[in-house]
Image (cartoon, helix red, strand yellow):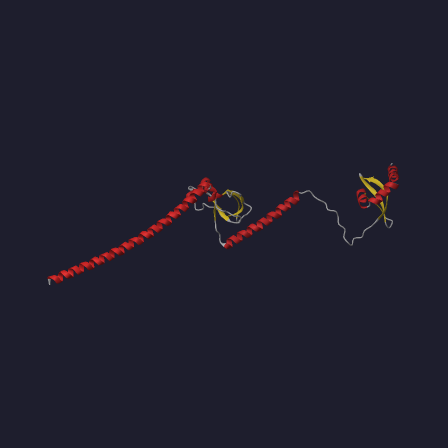
Amino acid sequence: MFKDGVVRFVIRAAEDTVAASETAKELQLRQVGVLRRAEKHLRKLHTEAEGNAILVSDERLNPESRIPQYEVGQHVRIWLGKQLKTDPLVLNARLAPHRWSEPWRVVAVSADRKTLDVVLARDPLQYERVSWMQVKRTFLEQEVRDALEGVFQRTMEQKKLSQRDAELARAPAKWAPEKRAANEEQFNIERVLQTRVQNRRREVLVLWEGGEKTWEPFGVIKKDAPELWEEFQAQGGRASKAASARSKK
């Protein structure tokens, strides 16, 4: 009986030892897995840290890389902190409910991307020039954006029309020559008869085809019938002038 008890005790001890060794192996495997996952996570963090360090160094070497890429047509909001601080009705600018303005539309961006030309979205005639540090991008609903874009386009068209009218008003008047209609009846001059000075204006007496005589402005006759005027000057122009002078006396 004593021997059987000893044998059972030894067998139990061996089983407990085997179970303990298996448990130790499982714990060891679990520890190895945890260590591997921790090592992988540390490598990832190290890689991200190196990338962030590179970005930070790039930003320090090139501060312009931090400037957002604003484009024409985007909508932004302007910081109102300075105005709120000077407003006597606002005791604390930080506690003000509206610290950012209503939407403004970007119409121009400087070459260095540091200055923006913006117009008020609901009234594009209000213009401002602001720094990129005073604004932030705002995203509007599609319907609101389409409505504001329509207001902007209509306002710009009206502005162009008003500018054109102003330029026409400032420009000197230009008289266009009178155009004759295609079916308008034309009369031909037969010859020049005489000249005179009437009310400080030189006039010419012409004979039209059909026998009618009329006094016409000298400039018109010289322009429309230069050959007849030269013929009058060559043949009897001087005599006609002398005769008109004697008639005045």
Residue 215 in sight in this render: no
The residue under the point 41% across, 44% down is 53
Q: Position of residue 34 (x, y in %)?
A: 31, 53
In the rendered structure, the answer to whether residue 97 lies left or right of residue 129 reads left
Query: Toward the viewer: 67 or 84?
Result: 67
| Location of residue 1 by image quarter | bottom left
Tag count:
0
User: Can see residue 57?
Assistant: yes
Residue located 26% across and 56% down the image: 25
Q: Quadrant of the C terminus?
A: top right
Figure quadrant of residue 226? top right
Residue 205 appears at what percent x and percent y? Answer: 85, 44
Q: Where is residue 167 in the image (x, y as percent from the top left)?
A: 64, 44
Q: Nearer the viewer, residue 166 or 88?
A: 166
Relative side of 42 to 171, left or right: left
Quadrant in the rendering for residue 5: bottom left
The residue furthest left is 1
Above or below 102: residue 11: below
Q: Which of the pair 144/33 is nearer the observer?
A: 33
The location of residue 137, given as percent across then percent down, is 48, 48
Q: Is residue 172 left or right of residue 186?
A: left
